[in-house]
Amino acid sequence: LLCNDHWEICYDLSLQLHNLYVEAEYCNGHFEEVGHAAGVVIKQARSFEDKLRIFATLIKSLAAQNKLHDTMQIGFDVLRELGVQCPSPLPDKSVAARDIMKTSMALKNKSKDEFLNYHEMNEGSMTAAMKFLQILLNSSFIAKQEYLPLIIDQMMKLT
């Protein structure tokens, strides 16, 4: 239905249609087509931000296929691009425990009122990072539980 040079002529429409197509294929369980169509969008997208929706759907598709190593790797790559450092491979347990304790101590000194008065997160890249951390949290809960504390710690740091 689209002309041959639709990405150049109607970029926004092409991006939107392809995003919707990939999401529909994911919902229908056509995971091979998700990978193929996602590859087209990743290649044609003009910016990293234009790829985020596709990456989210691709990661969920990989998780649905139980390809959890790929799920985590792509998710961590996206997070790094968004400016969030997530360890892959896992750091030494003592390093992870130290980081979690730092976050815990910082939160221990906060009252309920301080938490309730936090400003809503509205920076685009950090909101996107939280979305990807949530997707990875779901995947790690199922099969990569060693990542759970690190993902939760990173989510707490972003808030």
Image (cartoon, helix red, strand yellow):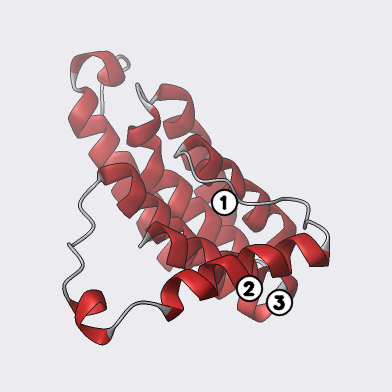
Residue 149: give its label: 2
**For the residues bearing labels 2 and 1, Cβ distance under 8 angstroms:** no
- For marks 1 and 3, give the CA distance: 15 Å
Q: Position of residue 28 (x, y in %)?
A: 44, 67
- For residue 145, say whether it is visible: yes
Locate residue 139: give its quadrant. bottom right
Q: Position of residue 38 (x, y in %)?
A: 48, 41
**For the residues bearing labels 3 and 2, Cβ distance under 8 angstroms:** no
Q: Amino acid at mark 1?
A: Gly
Number of numbered discs visible in the structure rendering: 3
Q: Amino acid at mark 2?
A: Pro
- For residue 30, say whether it is visible: no
Residue 142, compared with residue 23, is above or below; it is below
- For marks 3 and 2, give the CA distance: 8 Å
> Which quadrant, please, contains the C terminus?
bottom left
> Label 3 neighbourhood size at 10 Å, few (<14), some (14-19), many (20+)?
few
Nearer to the camera, 15 or 87: 87
List the residue tagged with mark 3: 145
Please give the name of the residue rendered at 35% of the width and 21% of the height, measured from the top-left corner.
46
4 displayed left or right of 121: right
Please give the name of the residue rendered at 37% of the width and 56% of the height, measured from the top-left corner.
23
Q: Amino acid at mark 3?
A: Gln
Please give the name of the residue rendered at 26% of the width and 28% of the height, measured from the top-left corner.
2
Residue lying at the far bottom of the rendered structure: 112
51 displayed left or right of 39: left
Mark found first going from the N terminus, 1 or 3: 1
154 displayed left or right of 96: left
Residue 75: give its label: 1
Label 1 sits on a secondary structure element that is helix
Nearer to the camera, 149 or 115: 115
- For marks 2 and 1, give the CA distance: 16 Å
